[in-house]
Image (cartoon, grey):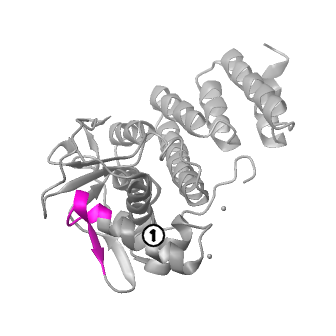
Amino acid sequence: MGAGVGSPVPVREAGDRAGRARFSPVEGGTMSGGTVQPVERRRTRTPAQPDQPFRLTLLGGWELQAGGEAVAMSSSGQRLLALLALRGRTQRDYAAGILWPESDDQSALANLRTTLWRVRQRARGAVISTQHEIELAPLVSLDIDGLVAAGRYLLEDGSGDSPADCAEIGRALAGHEPLLPGWYDDWVLTERERLQQLQVHALEVAAERLVQSRHLASALEIAQAATQVEPFRETAHCAVVKVLLQQANPAQAVRHYRRYESLLDRELGIRPSDHLRDLVRPVLSTT
Protein backbone atom coordinates (compact mmCIF):
# COMPACT_ATOMS: atom_id res chain seq x y z
CA MET A 1 0.00 0.00 0.00
CA GLY A 2 4.39 -12.03 -7.68
CA ALA A 3 10.01 -24.86 -10.85
CA GLY A 4 12.42 -26.58 -12.11
CA VAL A 5 11.68 -28.57 -15.23
CA GLY A 6 9.32 -31.39 -14.38
CA SER A 7 8.87 -30.46 -10.70
CA PRO A 8 5.23 -30.28 -9.60
CA VAL A 9 4.19 -27.24 -7.58
CA PRO A 10 2.05 -27.94 -4.49
CA VAL A 11 -1.58 -27.17 -5.15
CA ARG A 12 -3.21 -24.63 -2.84
CA GLU A 13 -6.97 -24.52 -2.30
CA ALA A 14 -8.67 -22.54 -5.08
CA GLY A 15 -10.73 -20.58 -2.56
CA ASP A 16 -13.63 -21.92 -0.52
CA ARG A 17 -15.89 -22.25 -3.56
CA ALA A 18 -13.52 -24.22 -5.77
CA GLY A 19 -12.41 -26.30 -2.81
CA ARG A 20 -15.98 -27.55 -2.37
CA ALA A 21 -16.33 -28.62 -5.99
CA ARG A 22 -16.78 -32.32 -6.65
CA PHE A 23 -16.52 -34.26 -9.87
CA SER A 24 -18.26 -37.34 -11.20
CA PRO A 25 -17.49 -38.99 -14.53
CA VAL A 26 -21.24 -39.21 -15.03
CA GLU A 27 -22.49 -35.89 -13.66
CA GLY A 28 -19.16 -34.08 -13.67
CA GLY A 29 -18.33 -30.44 -13.64
CA THR A 30 -18.37 -28.81 -17.05
CA MET A 31 -18.36 -32.01 -19.08
CA SER A 32 -21.03 -34.18 -20.64
CA GLY A 33 -20.15 -37.25 -22.64
CA GLY A 34 -16.45 -36.49 -22.33
CA THR A 35 -16.58 -33.03 -23.88
CA VAL A 36 -16.25 -29.59 -22.38
CA GLN A 37 -19.52 -27.73 -22.83
CA PRO A 38 -19.07 -24.38 -24.61
CA VAL A 39 -20.41 -21.25 -23.00
CA GLU A 40 -22.96 -19.54 -25.20
CA ARG A 41 -21.76 -15.96 -25.59
CA ARG A 42 -24.24 -13.17 -26.24
CA ARG A 43 -23.70 -9.48 -25.55
CA THR A 44 -25.96 -7.15 -23.63
CA ARG A 45 -25.55 -4.01 -21.58
CA THR A 46 -28.64 -4.66 -19.49
CA PRO A 47 -27.87 -5.04 -15.76
CA ALA A 48 -28.66 -8.45 -14.33
CA GLN A 49 -31.81 -8.77 -12.25
CA PRO A 50 -31.32 -9.34 -8.51
CA ASP A 51 -30.97 -12.89 -7.20
CA GLN A 52 -30.70 -14.58 -10.58
CA PRO A 53 -27.92 -17.13 -11.19
CA PHE A 54 -24.66 -15.95 -12.69
CA ARG A 55 -21.97 -17.83 -14.62
CA LEU A 56 -18.44 -16.42 -14.34
CA THR A 57 -15.99 -17.62 -16.98
CA LEU A 58 -12.26 -17.14 -16.38
CA LEU A 59 -10.74 -19.85 -18.60
CA GLY A 60 -9.95 -18.53 -22.06
CA GLY A 61 -11.12 -15.02 -21.12
CA TRP A 62 -13.34 -13.13 -18.69
CA GLU A 63 -17.11 -13.18 -19.05
CA LEU A 64 -20.04 -12.86 -16.67
CA GLN A 65 -23.40 -14.18 -17.80
CA ALA A 66 -26.85 -13.86 -16.29
CA GLY A 67 -29.74 -15.69 -17.88
CA GLY A 68 -27.52 -16.67 -20.81
CA GLU A 69 -26.63 -13.07 -21.64
CA ALA A 70 -23.31 -11.34 -20.99
CA VAL A 71 -23.19 -8.61 -18.36
CA ALA A 72 -20.97 -5.63 -19.17
CA MET A 73 -18.46 -4.85 -16.43
CA SER A 74 -15.67 -2.31 -15.93
CA SER A 75 -12.05 -3.46 -15.87
CA SER A 76 -11.84 -2.96 -12.11
CA GLY A 77 -15.09 -4.89 -11.65
CA GLN A 78 -13.76 -7.74 -13.75
CA ARG A 79 -10.62 -7.94 -11.65
CA LEU A 80 -12.53 -7.83 -8.39
CA LEU A 81 -14.84 -10.69 -9.40
CA ALA A 82 -11.89 -12.70 -10.73
CA LEU A 83 -9.98 -12.21 -7.48
CA LEU A 84 -12.94 -13.36 -5.40
CA ALA A 85 -13.45 -16.38 -7.66
CA LEU A 86 -9.83 -17.44 -7.27
CA ARG A 87 -9.20 -16.55 -3.64
CA GLY A 88 -12.63 -17.04 -2.05
CA ARG A 89 -13.74 -14.93 0.93
CA THR A 90 -11.28 -12.06 1.19
CA GLN A 91 -10.53 -9.26 3.63
CA ARG A 92 -11.42 -5.88 2.17
CA ASP A 93 -8.01 -4.36 2.86
CA TYR A 94 -6.26 -7.38 1.30
CA ALA A 95 -8.37 -7.15 -1.87
CA ALA A 96 -7.77 -3.40 -2.09
CA GLY A 97 -4.01 -3.88 -1.75
CA ILE A 98 -3.92 -6.61 -4.41
CA LEU A 99 -6.06 -4.74 -6.94
CA TRP A 100 -4.54 -1.27 -6.43
CA PRO A 101 -0.93 -1.94 -5.37
CA GLU A 102 0.26 1.52 -6.47
CA SER A 103 -2.23 3.33 -4.20
CA ASP A 104 -1.98 4.07 -0.49
CA ASP A 105 -4.31 2.20 1.86
CA GLN A 106 -6.99 4.90 2.02
CA SER A 107 -7.12 5.40 -1.75
CA ALA A 108 -7.15 1.66 -2.44
CA LEU A 109 -10.08 1.11 -0.06
CA ALA A 110 -11.93 4.02 -1.65
CA ASN A 111 -11.36 2.46 -5.07
CA LEU A 112 -12.70 -0.84 -3.74
CA ARG A 113 -15.87 0.80 -2.40
CA THR A 114 -16.47 2.50 -5.75
CA THR A 115 -15.89 -0.73 -7.64
CA LEU A 116 -18.25 -2.66 -5.36
CA TRP A 117 -20.95 -0.06 -5.93
CA ARG A 118 -20.52 -0.35 -9.71
CA VAL A 119 -20.56 -4.14 -9.60
CA ARG A 120 -23.84 -4.03 -7.66
CA GLN A 121 -25.35 -1.81 -10.36
CA ARG A 122 -24.46 -4.33 -13.07
CA ALA A 123 -24.75 -7.64 -11.20
CA ARG A 124 -26.85 -7.15 -8.09
CA GLY A 125 -26.53 -10.07 -5.70
CA ALA A 126 -23.29 -11.43 -7.18
CA VAL A 127 -21.12 -10.21 -4.29
CA ILE A 128 -21.70 -10.56 -0.54
CA SER A 129 -19.95 -7.94 1.58
CA THR A 130 -19.61 -7.16 5.26
CA GLN A 131 -17.71 -4.40 7.00
CA HIS A 132 -14.46 -6.34 6.72
CA GLU A 133 -14.92 -9.12 4.12
CA ILE A 134 -16.21 -9.69 0.59
CA GLU A 135 -16.97 -12.87 -1.35
CA LEU A 136 -18.92 -14.15 -4.33
CA ALA A 137 -22.48 -15.19 -3.63
CA PRO A 138 -23.39 -18.90 -3.92
CA LEU A 139 -25.54 -18.11 -6.97
CA VAL A 140 -22.35 -17.39 -8.98
CA SER A 141 -21.09 -20.57 -10.65
CA LEU A 142 -17.49 -20.76 -11.86
CA ASP A 143 -15.96 -22.55 -14.82
CA ILE A 144 -12.73 -23.05 -12.85
CA ASP A 145 -14.64 -25.33 -10.48
CA GLY A 146 -14.84 -27.92 -13.27
CA LEU A 147 -11.09 -27.86 -13.87
CA VAL A 148 -10.25 -28.05 -10.16
CA ALA A 149 -12.77 -30.81 -9.49
CA ALA A 150 -11.63 -32.94 -12.44
CA GLY A 151 -7.96 -32.51 -11.53
CA ARG A 152 -8.47 -33.41 -7.89
CA TYR A 153 -10.69 -36.32 -8.81
CA LEU A 154 -7.94 -37.86 -10.93
CA LEU A 155 -5.31 -37.19 -8.27
CA GLU A 156 -7.28 -38.29 -5.21
CA ASP A 157 -10.35 -40.35 -6.06
CA GLY A 158 -10.10 -41.80 -9.55
CA SER A 159 -7.84 -44.83 -9.08
CA GLY A 160 -10.79 -47.23 -9.25
CA ASP A 161 -12.27 -45.81 -12.44
CA SER A 162 -12.46 -47.82 -15.64
CA PRO A 163 -9.91 -46.91 -18.34
CA ALA A 164 -12.73 -45.42 -20.41
CA ASP A 165 -13.75 -43.12 -17.55
CA CYS A 166 -10.14 -42.17 -16.88
CA ALA A 167 -9.62 -41.25 -20.53
CA GLU A 168 -12.92 -39.35 -20.66
CA ILE A 169 -12.08 -37.23 -17.63
CA GLY A 170 -8.55 -36.67 -18.92
CA ARG A 171 -9.85 -35.40 -22.26
CA ALA A 172 -12.25 -33.04 -20.52
CA LEU A 173 -9.44 -31.75 -18.31
CA ALA A 174 -7.15 -31.25 -21.30
CA GLY A 175 -9.83 -29.16 -23.02
CA HIS A 176 -9.75 -26.33 -20.48
CA GLU A 177 -8.16 -23.12 -21.75
CA PRO A 178 -5.61 -21.07 -19.77
CA LEU A 179 -6.75 -18.76 -16.99
CA LEU A 180 -7.39 -15.17 -18.11
CA PRO A 181 -4.97 -15.02 -21.07
CA GLY A 182 -3.65 -11.51 -21.60
CA TRP A 183 -3.86 -10.60 -17.90
CA TYR A 184 -0.42 -10.03 -16.36
CA ASP A 185 -1.20 -9.01 -12.78
CA ASP A 186 1.12 -10.86 -10.38
CA TRP A 187 -1.79 -12.56 -8.61
CA VAL A 188 -3.23 -13.75 -11.93
CA LEU A 189 0.12 -15.19 -13.02
CA THR A 190 0.38 -17.05 -9.71
CA GLU A 191 -3.11 -18.53 -10.05
CA ARG A 192 -2.58 -19.40 -13.72
CA GLU A 193 0.58 -21.33 -12.85
CA ARG A 194 -1.15 -23.10 -9.97
CA LEU A 195 -4.06 -24.25 -12.14
CA GLN A 196 -1.70 -25.35 -14.93
CA GLN A 197 0.32 -27.41 -12.46
CA LEU A 198 -2.84 -29.10 -11.20
CA GLN A 199 -4.02 -29.72 -14.75
CA VAL A 200 -0.77 -31.20 -16.06
CA HIS A 201 -0.09 -33.29 -12.94
CA ALA A 202 -3.56 -34.83 -13.17
CA LEU A 203 -3.06 -35.54 -16.88
CA GLU A 204 0.22 -37.32 -16.12
CA VAL A 205 -1.53 -39.45 -13.50
CA ALA A 206 -4.29 -40.31 -15.96
CA ALA A 207 -1.74 -41.25 -18.63
CA GLU A 208 0.12 -43.51 -16.19
CA ARG A 209 -3.10 -45.32 -15.22
CA LEU A 210 -3.92 -45.85 -18.87
CA VAL A 211 -0.44 -47.27 -19.49
CA GLN A 212 -0.90 -49.68 -16.59
CA SER A 213 -4.19 -50.87 -18.08
CA ARG A 214 -2.55 -51.19 -21.53
CA HIS A 215 -4.77 -48.56 -23.14
CA LEU A 216 -1.76 -47.09 -24.89
CA ALA A 217 -3.52 -45.01 -27.56
CA SER A 218 -5.51 -43.13 -24.92
CA ALA A 219 -2.41 -42.85 -22.72
CA LEU A 220 -0.48 -41.23 -25.58
CA GLU A 221 -3.31 -38.78 -26.26
CA ILE A 222 -3.47 -37.70 -22.61
CA ALA A 223 0.33 -37.50 -22.22
CA GLN A 224 0.63 -35.36 -25.35
CA ALA A 225 -2.08 -33.07 -23.99
CA ALA A 226 0.01 -32.59 -20.86
CA THR A 227 2.96 -31.39 -22.97
CA GLN A 228 0.68 -28.83 -24.62
CA VAL A 229 -0.35 -27.45 -21.23
CA GLU A 230 3.26 -27.22 -20.00
CA PRO A 231 5.70 -27.44 -22.95
CA PHE A 232 8.82 -27.35 -20.72
CA ARG A 233 7.67 -29.91 -18.14
CA GLU A 234 9.95 -32.92 -18.43
CA THR A 235 7.71 -35.42 -16.63
CA ALA A 236 5.05 -34.87 -19.30
CA HIS A 237 7.56 -35.55 -22.08
CA CYS A 238 8.81 -38.61 -20.20
CA ALA A 239 5.24 -39.92 -20.23
CA VAL A 240 5.03 -39.47 -24.01
CA VAL A 241 8.36 -41.22 -24.60
CA LYS A 242 7.42 -44.14 -22.32
CA VAL A 243 4.15 -44.71 -24.17
CA LEU A 244 5.82 -44.57 -27.58
CA LEU A 245 8.43 -47.10 -26.48
CA GLN A 246 5.74 -49.40 -25.11
CA GLN A 247 3.95 -49.11 -28.45
CA ALA A 248 7.17 -50.30 -30.13
CA ASN A 249 7.60 -46.96 -31.87
CA PRO A 250 11.26 -46.17 -31.10
CA ALA A 251 11.72 -43.78 -34.02
CA GLN A 252 8.80 -41.64 -32.83
CA ALA A 253 10.14 -41.74 -29.28
CA VAL A 254 13.53 -40.47 -30.45
CA ARG A 255 11.95 -37.75 -32.60
CA HIS A 256 9.89 -36.56 -29.65
CA TYR A 257 12.99 -36.55 -27.45
CA ARG A 258 14.97 -34.57 -30.06
CA ARG A 259 12.22 -31.95 -30.37
CA TYR A 260 12.09 -31.53 -26.61
CA GLU A 261 15.91 -31.38 -26.40
CA SER A 262 15.93 -28.66 -29.07
CA LEU A 263 13.17 -26.71 -27.29
CA LEU A 264 15.08 -26.69 -24.00
CA ASP A 265 18.34 -25.66 -25.66
CA ARG A 266 16.72 -22.90 -27.72
CA GLU A 267 14.49 -21.41 -25.03
CA LEU A 268 16.30 -22.14 -21.75
CA GLY A 269 19.85 -23.15 -22.64
CA ILE A 270 19.60 -26.44 -20.71
CA ARG A 271 19.48 -30.14 -21.52
CA PRO A 272 17.01 -32.87 -20.57
CA SER A 273 17.79 -34.77 -17.39
CA ASP A 274 19.78 -38.00 -17.28
CA HIS A 275 16.53 -39.84 -16.55
CA LEU A 276 14.94 -38.85 -19.86
CA ARG A 277 18.16 -39.41 -21.81
CA ASP A 278 18.44 -42.88 -20.27
CA LEU A 279 14.95 -43.72 -21.54
CA VAL A 280 15.92 -43.15 -25.16
CA ARG A 281 19.60 -44.08 -25.04
CA PRO A 282 19.00 -47.80 -25.87
CA VAL A 283 17.21 -46.87 -29.10
CA LEU A 284 19.28 -43.87 -30.19
CA SER A 285 21.82 -45.99 -32.03
CA THR A 286 19.16 -48.04 -33.80
CA THR A 287 17.14 -45.18 -35.26
Vertical position of residue 127 compared to residue 174: above or below: below
The magenta segment is 118-129
The local crowd at label 1, few if under 14, some if 14 to 19, many if 20 or more residues have their Cα within 10 Å, is: some
Dot 1 amino acid type: Asn
Q: Residue 236 appears at what percent x and percent y?
A: 63, 39
214 left or right of 269 in image:
left
Say which quarter of the image contains residue 245: top right
173 left or right of 64 in image:
right
Identify the residue shown where x is 49% and y is 42%. 178
Say which quarter of the image contains residue 131: bottom left
151 left or right of 40 in image:
right
- Report if residue 179 lies within the magenta region: no
13 left or right of 56 in image:
right
Quick one: which residue is furthest to the top in this view?
A: 287
Vertical position of residue 43 compared to residue 22: above or below: above
Callout 1 secondary element: helix
Q: Which residue is mark 1?
A: 111
Q: Residue 267 appears at what percent x and percent y?
A: 79, 33
Residue in the foreground of this view, choosing between 195 and 47: 47
- Report if residue 124 lies within the magenta region: yes
Residue in the foreground of this view, choosing between 66 and 154: 66
Identify the residue shown where x is 45% and y is 80%. 91
Which part of the image, by quadrant, shows the N terminus?
bottom right
Vertical position of residue 253 compared to residue 54: above or below: above
Can residue 202 be seen from the camera position used here?
Answer: yes
Residue in the foreground of this view, choosing between 124 and 154: 124
Say which quarter of the image contains residue 42: top left
Identify the residue shown where x is 69% and y is 53%. 7
Which part of the image, by quadrant, shows the C terminus?
top right
Q: Residue 115 appears at what percent x and percent y?
A: 38, 65
